[in-house]
Amino acid sequence: MLAAIAGKLAEQGERLLLVSEDEAQLASLDRILWEEGGKTSFLAHGIEGQGRDADQPVLLSTRMIAANSARNVALADGSWRAAALDYERAFMLFDDSTIAGAREAWKSLGDTEGVERHYWAREEGKWVQKA
């Protein structure tokens, strides 16, 4: 799913900051972006600090600082950060181990002015908007 989001944003000329505090997860996501992005087309990306951060359409980082001038952020580790509200779009990715925090973030964002929430789930191999 992450490669699909990054790919769609790239098609629109947008940039993405991909954040996880877990460096091992970032390494795994780096590998996934190379493998999944390569199925349809090259998906350029880089890890913060490895060079040319400002030029990366997709920048993987442990910090909420968009050195690539991204207006979109994906929180890959399932942890909500209030700084995500500084971006035009924020994607919060979560799994079974982080779903409680995702539910809490969903509820609290419902009271936040100017925030439009959407929830997508995978059903029978397809992404379906649930809310």
Image (cartoon, rainbow, N blue to C red):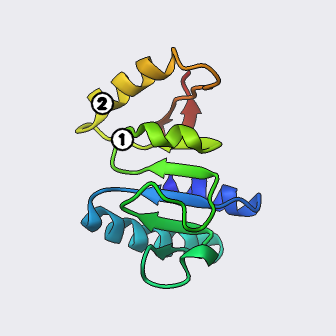
Relative side of 105 to 116, left or right? left
Relative side of 121 to 131, left or right? left
- Tell me which corner region of the image, top left, top right, bottom left or bottom right, holds residue 81: top left
Q: Residue at x 45, y 66 (%)?
A: 60
Neighbor class of circle 2 (other Cα within 10 Å; few <14, some 14-19, many 20+) is some
Q: Residue at x 43, y 83 (%)?
A: 50
**Looking at the image, which residue sits at the far right?**
12
Relative side of 61 to 98, left or right? right
- Tell me which corner region of the image, top left, top right, bottom left or bottom right, holds residue 67: bottom right
Residue 19 is tagged as: none
- Where's residue 106, x and y in %? 44, 24
Is the C terminus in the top left, top right, bottom left or bottom right quadrant?
top right
Q: Is residue 106 visible?
A: yes
Q: Nearer the viewer, residue 86 or 88?
A: 86
- Where's residue 24, x and y in %? 25, 67
Q: Nearer the viewer, residue 54 or 20?
A: 54
Q: Is residue 126 visible?
A: no
* Residue to which mark 1 is pinned: 94
- Where's residue 109, x and y in %? 49, 22
- Tell me which corner region of the image, top left, top right, bottom left or bottom right, holds residue 11: bottom right
Residue 101 is tagged as: 2
Neighbor class of circle 1 (other Cα within 10 Å; few <14, some 14-19, many 20+) is some
